[in-house]
Image (tube, coloured by chain):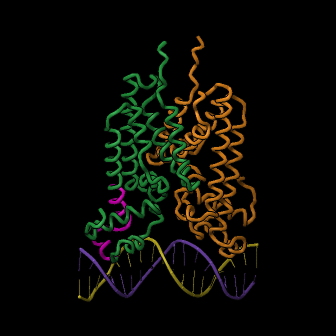
Chain colours: A green, B orange, C yellow, D purple
Amino acid sequence: MYGVVMSTQERLIETTRELLWERGYVGTSPKAILQRAGVGQGSMYHHFAGKSDLALTAIRRTGEEMRATVDRLLGADGSAYDRIAAYLLRERDVLRGCPVGRLTMDPDVIASDELRGPVDDTIAYVKGRLADIVQEGVDSGEFAAHLVPREIAAAVVATVQGGYVLARASGDTDAFDAGVRGLLSLLKPSPVPTA
Amino acid sequence: MYGVVMSTQERLIETTRELLWERGYVGTSPKAILQRAGVGQGSMYHHFAGKSDLALTAIRRTGEEMRATVDRLLGADGSAYDRIAAYLLRERDVLRGCPVGRLTMDPDVIASDELRGPVDDTIAYVKGRLADIVQEGVDSGEFAAHLVPREIAAAVVATVQGGYVLARASGDTDAFDAGVRGLLSLLKPSPVPTA
DNA sequence: GTCTATACTGAGATAGAC
DNA sequence: GTCTATCTCAGTATAGAC
């Protein structure tokens, strides 16, 4: 990506993705986007209808990227536990938070069905994929039969999203890691005493 | 609280608490506060140095309130599991999110050690109290000995904070409840086969 | 203490030249 | 397509009257 010459339109989208991640929708002004992208006002209003239209394009792309990442992590080999652990333990820039989840705290995003749409879809997709894995684990006997896949999946995604909150509150990534380790310790299939 | 006559200063603080909860720090303007409080500009700058000073006062109070709530829930009778469940299952206005946790997504709050301070302190306090309960549960044999109290506490708080994200993304409180139930199903002490 | 008036910058969008 | 005016209103704060 770096060093690649991007079209003006691409630069606007990528810059908007960065700023939405850093500052959210309310905290991101068209002027800030244009300055960072090194583009004039006219270009933005030529390619996009306005701030919300540009943001929608950026959010959709970020959502697509996240699905691809999740597919890669959860589609790998290994037990159900291993794949869930891979999702939880993946390298992250923890203090930056989640580029999708953070938008749920944005009042203007939540107030707009159009902007909230891709956020909702992306998170629902991740939960669904995780629920599939948990179901596999239950079916194979790896996980206890009483576990409800969509509930475990929700807990897993919530731990990640909440982990960002803990880490950003303290300014320390350890808080994120602690939560993840706690969940994994609860999820770990105990070696069944077959005696 | 309702119907009680509040001083102008009190009205400013309470209104700011509301708006910070609804819209965050970046999304809350002094003008919006003044209009909702029905107060003129002068009063605000008489009692407070500016937006950040007023916000700091409001955040501190919200943090105190949260500690009191947590003390009440975790100080009740019952097993460790029961008290943690009480915390997780307490009545909440889920779609509003957490008035403290949401501030961690606010770039201006995170950029200011002064504003982030009470947010960090409050969340650390909740984690600490929960860790105490988990430690009790481990000591009494209610929880497995390999569980690390501060990790389980982090997972519990993260599930709540992340649950808000899931619920707000979908516009449905069920997503929050699912995550909480998932975590509780993992945490539930299995009836030990004493045979 | 509280109010209104004023000031200045930024947010968000439009108009029109090149 | 991209740029630079220009416009209107909101954000944040100060000044000074009552």
> Which quadrant of the figure has residue A143?
top left
From the viewer's perspective, tell me whether residue A24 is left or right of residue B86: left
Whether residue A56 appears in magenta in the rendering, the answer is yes
Measuring from the top left, give residue B12's x and y in whole percent.
68, 65
Measuring from the top left, give residue A34's x and y in whole percent.
37, 73
**Picture mark count:** 0
Q: Out of B74 and B97, give the one closest to the viewer.
A: B74
Q: Given the current orientation, which residue lies at the most extreme top position?
A: B195
Residue A97: tell me if it is visible.
yes
Q: Out of B146 and B41, give the one closest to the viewer.
A: B146
Residue sitting at x 54%, y 59%: B23
Residue B96: tell me if it is visible.
no
User: Looking at the figure, which quarter contains the C terminus of chain B?
Assistant: top right
Does residue B129 lie above or below B11 as drawn?
A: above
Whether residue A15 appears in magenta in the rendering, the answer is no
From the viewer's perspective, tell me whether residue B141 is left or right of residue B180: right
From the viewer's perspective, tell me whether residue A38 is left or right of residue B87: left
Residue sitting at x 62%, y 69%: B51
Q: Which residues are magenta?
A: A41-60
Q: Main secondary structure of the magenta part?
A: helix
Measuring from the top left, give residue B57's x and y in whole percent.
69, 62
Q: Out of A123 and D11, give the one closest to the viewer.
A: A123
Residue sitting at x 37%, y 33%: A133
Measuring from the top left, give residue B139's x and y in whole percent.
67, 29
Does residue B80 lie above or below A70 as drawn?
A: above
> Which quadrant of the figure has residue B151?
top right
